[in-house]
Image (tube, rainbow, N blue to C red):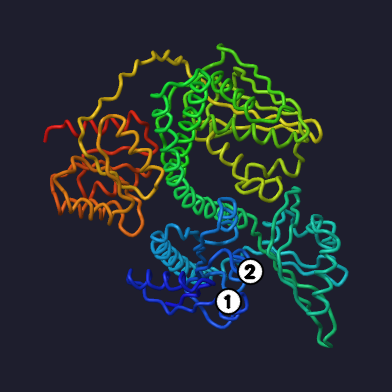
């Protein structure tokens, strides 16, 4: 296979080549460093894969991606860079990159390459199959086409049955009438003049037009117009063959959305893993600080930190649930509590020029759902409201019990009944009529570049649908916007939660624990948490380092805690190597990816699993339970 590698660092070029070779991938590599060399190679040869750094002197990755999409749109394009942020990563996926890999995590490159090549091969097979199908049904399609003939003045002199089906008029109704007053009502005058000019100069024209049916319905047609000449080679008439492609264009748009969301799911999984690692030192650190003598103000601050970190951890789990198409368990929720939480966030973080009003009481009907997802809806809507009021204004959160029993009160795929309506309204600049039809489309945004990804309202709508609810919006330019979220009400009220008194985690008796993780922050905070409770701790920042340590004194270690996703030697390989040295060693997996854990469980046996981000208490309970468990 042929690989084009755009990279100005020779060491990174060698690294990629060696990684491919060591993994059994055989490539003929064309390594280039500059824009000119990249574009020359791209235009002269055909490549099976393109790997590019994002930041090149006097060049950038998005420009390289644009050229690649133009010259060789079918070739998979992967970014391998150390200088790419989340916003830019989303932008690169929107513009056609199949993946991005950070140089800090090179072990992810080869799986990404294999996935990209596999997907490209599948697309090629699909295109070939579709090509054969198109050839077989070409003649049948023509029978469905609209075929009409116009004189040189644009009046209709022939109108077939296909045209009747496409446009709705019969032949008797249109004969002798000008097309400009019928099907071309939706075509702009400059565009129509350009079509006529092209036909007169070249003898033919082909392209897409937005036309209109007898019922006034706009349709998209793939049109072909040919100039017909008489025996003296003088222009005589125009032959038009039009195919209604409205449904096809809609399906293509849906397919492209699905592809973008699929790519986003891959991106979310990678980001979620990193976020889980970042949250561990915060959550465990809060528990450690609580053990110290601190002031009341400091305790309040710790409570805020802990609540925010736990909320972030919940949102990360929900992101992964969405990306994998799974669904967590739902509970009974009181919306007034959600609104109170959101009011506090607004008060703490929004500009003081924005005043928040909350109209909700305990008479609001409860709903069944996922608290984090409903919180996410409110957060997205409130952030949009904030951005719509750059000079300040009023943001109102309210709940209302509504009875929707008429047939047209709810969407046709939902059941009439009692609904709780949660409204978020602002006094901002409003949304135009043209934009309001598109705001729920993925990646559509009215914000400036770099200010948003266009996924907030799309996510809100997806969450509402997963809760058997729906969202409506009303807006007037200059007078603000109101979003209403309707959720089915339930008759069961939530039970009052009885606070459980926490007992101090059990202390150790000097048992030595080896902690393995490639994140220094996690190693440091885990060591502190365990040592504070009487354990002796050794750390290793890689699987290889852990195996070397363990091989020296295997009997001195009572327990091993290891991450799974580590470079070069991952957690699974590390566990296998450790068990070869001492088969009975007790091992706990600490990972932020349940999918990785499930795959690991099918290959090795461990004593326990602690999900990142874990709390101090969860860690200590797991350690105590494993150490005291009898085999």
**Do the CB atoms of the residues marked 2 and 1 lie less than 8 Å apart?**
yes
Residue at 31 percent across and 33 percent down: it is: 619
Taking 377 as reference, is 354 left or right?
right
The residue at which mark 1 appears reads as 38
Extreme residue in the right direction: 153
Taking 496 as reference, is 157 left or right?
right
Extreme residue in the left direction: 631
Q: Mark 1: few, some, or many residues within 10 Å (few <14, many ≥20)?
A: many
Relative depth, front residue between 117 and 410: 117
Question: Within the image, what quadrant is residue 251 found in?
Answer: bottom right
Question: Within the image, what quadrant is residue 219 found in?
Answer: bottom right
Does residue 135 lie above or below 249 as drawn? below
Relative depth, front residue between 149 and 441: 441
Question: Within the image, what quadrant is residue 607 found in?
Answer: top left
Relative depth, front residue between 120 and 469: 120
Labelled disc at residue 59: 2
C-alpha gap between disc 2 and disc 1: 11 Å
Q: How many labels does the image show?
A: 2
| Spot occupied by residue 371 in the image (x, y as percentages of width and height) | 48, 27
Instruction: Please indicate, yes or no, whether residue 405 appears anywhere in the rendered image.
Output: no
Looking at the rendered structure, the secondary structure element under dot 2 is strand
Q: Mark 2: few, some, or many residues within 10 Å (few <14, many ≥20)?
A: some
Looking at the rendered structure, the secondary structure element under dot 1 is helix
Mark toward the viewer: 2 or 1: 2
Instruction: Please indicate, yes or no, whether residue 175 appears anywhere in the rendered image.
Output: yes
């Amino acid at each position: 296979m042929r690989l084009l590698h755009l990279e100005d660092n020779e060491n990174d070029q060698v690294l990629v080549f060696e990684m491919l070779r060591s993994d059994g991938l055989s490539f003929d590599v064309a390594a280039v460093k500059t824009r000119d060399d990249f574009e020359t190679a791209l235009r002269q040869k055909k490549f099976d894969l393109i790997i590019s750094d994002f930041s090149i002197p006097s060049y950038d990755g998005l420009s390289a991606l644009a050229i690649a999409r133009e010259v060789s749109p079918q070739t998979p394009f992967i970014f391998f860079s150390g200088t790419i942020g989340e916003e830019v990563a989303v932008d690169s996926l929107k513009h056609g990159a199949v993946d991005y890999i950070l140089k800090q995590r090179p072990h992810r490159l080869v799986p990404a390459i294999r996935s990209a090549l596999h997907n490209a091969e599948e697309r090629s097979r699909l295109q070939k199959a579709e090509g054969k199908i198109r050839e077989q049904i070409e003649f049948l399609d023509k029978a469905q086409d609209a075929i009409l003939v116009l004189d040189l003045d644009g009046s209709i002199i022939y109108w077939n049955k296909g045209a009747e089906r496409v446009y709705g008029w019969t032949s008797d109704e249109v004969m002798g009438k000008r097309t400009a007053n019928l099907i071309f009502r939706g075509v702009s005058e400059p565009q129509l003049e350009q079509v006529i000019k092209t036909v007169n100069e070249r003898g033919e024209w082909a392209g897409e037009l937005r036309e209109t049916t007898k019922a006034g319905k706009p349709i998209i047609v793939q049109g072909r117009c040919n100039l017909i000449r008489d025996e003296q080679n003088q222009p005589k008439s125009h032959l038009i063959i039009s195919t209604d492609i409205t449904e096809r264009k809609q399906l293509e748009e849906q397919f492209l959305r699905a592809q973008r969301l699929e790519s986003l799911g891959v991106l979310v999984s990678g980001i979620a893993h990193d976020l889980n690692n970042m949250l561990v030192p915060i959550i465990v650190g809060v528990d450690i600080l609580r053990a110290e003598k601190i002031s009341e103000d400091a305790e309040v601050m710790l409570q805020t930190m802990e609540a925010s970190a736990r909320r972030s951890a919940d949102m990360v789990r929900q992101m992964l649930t969405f990306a994998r198409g799974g669904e967590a368990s739902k509970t009974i929720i009181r919306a007034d509590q959600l609104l109170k939480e959101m009011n506090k966030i607004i008060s703490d973080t929004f500009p003081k020029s924005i005043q928040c009003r909350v109209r909700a009481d305990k008479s609001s009907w409860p709903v069944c759902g996922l608290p984090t997802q409903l919180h996410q809806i409110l957060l997205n809507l409130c952030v949009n409201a904030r951005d719509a009021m750059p000079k300040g204004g009023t943001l109102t959160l309210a709940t209302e019990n509504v009875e929707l029993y008429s047939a047209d009160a709810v969407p046709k795929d939902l059941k009439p009944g009692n609904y709780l309506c949660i409204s978020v309204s602002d006094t901002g600049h409003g949304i135009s009529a043209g934009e309001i039809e598109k705001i729920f489309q993925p990646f559509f945004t009215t914000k400036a570049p770099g200010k948003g990804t266009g996924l907030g309202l799309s996510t809100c709508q997806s969450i509402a649908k997963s809760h058997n609810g729906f969202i409506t919006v009303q807006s007037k330019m200059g007078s603000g916007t109101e979003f209403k979220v309707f959720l089915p009400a339930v008759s069961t009220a939530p039970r009052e939660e009885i606070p459980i008194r926490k007992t101090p985690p059990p202390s150790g008796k000097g048992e030595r624990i080896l902690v393995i993780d490639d994140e220094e922050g996690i190693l440091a905070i885990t060591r502190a948490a365990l040592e504070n409770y009487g354990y002796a701790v050794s750390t290793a920042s890689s699987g290889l380092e852990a195996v070397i340590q363990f091989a020296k004194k295997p009997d001195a270690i009572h327990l091993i805690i290891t991450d799974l996703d580590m470079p070069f030697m991952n957690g699974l390989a590390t566990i296998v190597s450790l068990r070869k040295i001492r088969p009975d060693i007790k091992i706990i997996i600490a990972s932020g990816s349940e999918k990785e854990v499930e795959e690991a469980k099918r290959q090795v046996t461990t004593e326990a699993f602690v999900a990142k981000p874990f709390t101090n208490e969860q860690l200590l309970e797991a350690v105590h339970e494993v150490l005291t468990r009898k085999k």
